[in-house]
Image: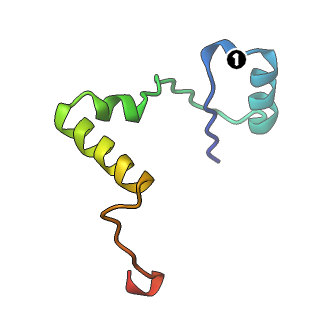
Amino acid sequence: MLATYKLKASEIDQSVIDTIKNLFKDREIEIIIHEVKDETEYLLKSTNNKTQLLTAISNVENKKHLEEFTVEGI
């Protein structure tokens, strides 16, 4: 069984622990914690990426340079 919890460290309380314990009972589990990176922030660090992303957003907002496709065409 796999369970993924995405929350802020400040949100971890006894109820989170109790939920995990109730879900997995006496089975051996492994808890791995890693910091979630903001993908948008990461992509905007590069000047080229930032320019391309902001241009794409502007194009969508202004309905410019859009391409239409159908599901059948994929």
Counting other residues with Cα less than 10 Å from the Cα at mark 1, is it few (<14), some (14-19), or many (20 or more)? few
* Residue at 40%, 78% in the rendered image: 69
- In this rendered view, identify the residue nearer to me: 4 or 39: 39
Residue appearing at x 30%, y 64% in the figure: 65
Residue 5: x and y, percent? 64, 33
43 versus 2 height, above or below: above
Q: Amino acid at mark 1?
A: Glu
Asked if residue 42 is positioned above or below residue 11 in the image, the reply reads below
**Colouring used for the render:** rainbow
Going 30% across and 32% down the picture, which residue do you hit? Answer: 44
Query: Along the line of sight, which residue is nearer the eye, 45 or 14?
Result: 45
Extreme left residue here? 48
Report which quarter residue 62 is drawn in. Answer: bottom left
The quarter of the picture where the C terminus appears is bottom left
- Tell me the quarter of the picture where residue 49 sits: top left
In this figure, which residue is indicated by the disc labeled 1?
11
**Left or right: 39 in relation to 28:** left
SS type, badge 1: helix
| Residue positioned most to the top | 10
Q: Position of residue 12 (x, y in %)?
A: 70, 17
